[in-house]
Image (spheres, rainbow, N blue to C red):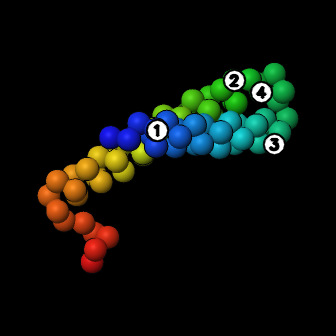
Amino acid sequence: MNIRVIIFSAIMTALIGAMIGLALTKISQREQRRNILIIGGASVGFVIGAFQASIREQKRIRDEEFGDSDELQ
């Protein structure tokens, strides 16, 4: 597994999650919940990004071992 790809994907989706949290605070006009939404969005984004990249890497490894791939068809 390529750990660099997993960490990079997790960080990028964490940034997207933080931006969504920031947008939610702006839309809802509740500045007292700003830190909670930004940290929550970044945390959820990090977990989702790491999970997605892990699945993608695992699929790539499995395809290399068994020699079958959907990309070749």
* Closer to viewer: mark 3 or mark 1: 1
Q: Which residue is mark 3?
A: 27
- Alpha carbon distance from label 2 to label 3: 15 Å
Of callouts 3 and 1, which one flags the residue occurring earlier in the amino acid sequence? 1
Is mark 1 in CB contact (under 8 Å) with mark 4?
A: no
Three-letter code for the amino acid on which mark 3 is drawn: Ile
Of callouts 2 and 3, which one flags the residue occurring earlier in the amino acid sequence? 3
Which class describes the residues within 10 Å of circle 3: few (<14), some (14-19), or many (20+)? few
Of callouts 1 and 2, which one flags the residue occurring earlier in the amino acid sequence? 1
* Closer to viewer: mark 3 or mark 4: 4
Residue nearest the viewer, comparing 70 with 2 = 2
Q: Which residue is mark 4?
A: 34
* Residue located at (19% from left, 65% from top): 68
* Residue located at (57% from left, 37% from top): 11
Q: Which quadrant holds residue 73?
A: bottom left
Q: Which residue is mark 1?
A: 4
* Residue located at (85% from left, 35% from top): 29
Which class describes the residues within 10 Å of circle 4: few (<14), some (14-19), or many (20+)? some
- Alpha carbon distance from label 3 to label 1: 35 Å
Q: Which residue is mark 2?
A: 36
Helix, strand or loop at disc 3?
Answer: helix
Helix, strand or loop at disc 4?
Answer: helix
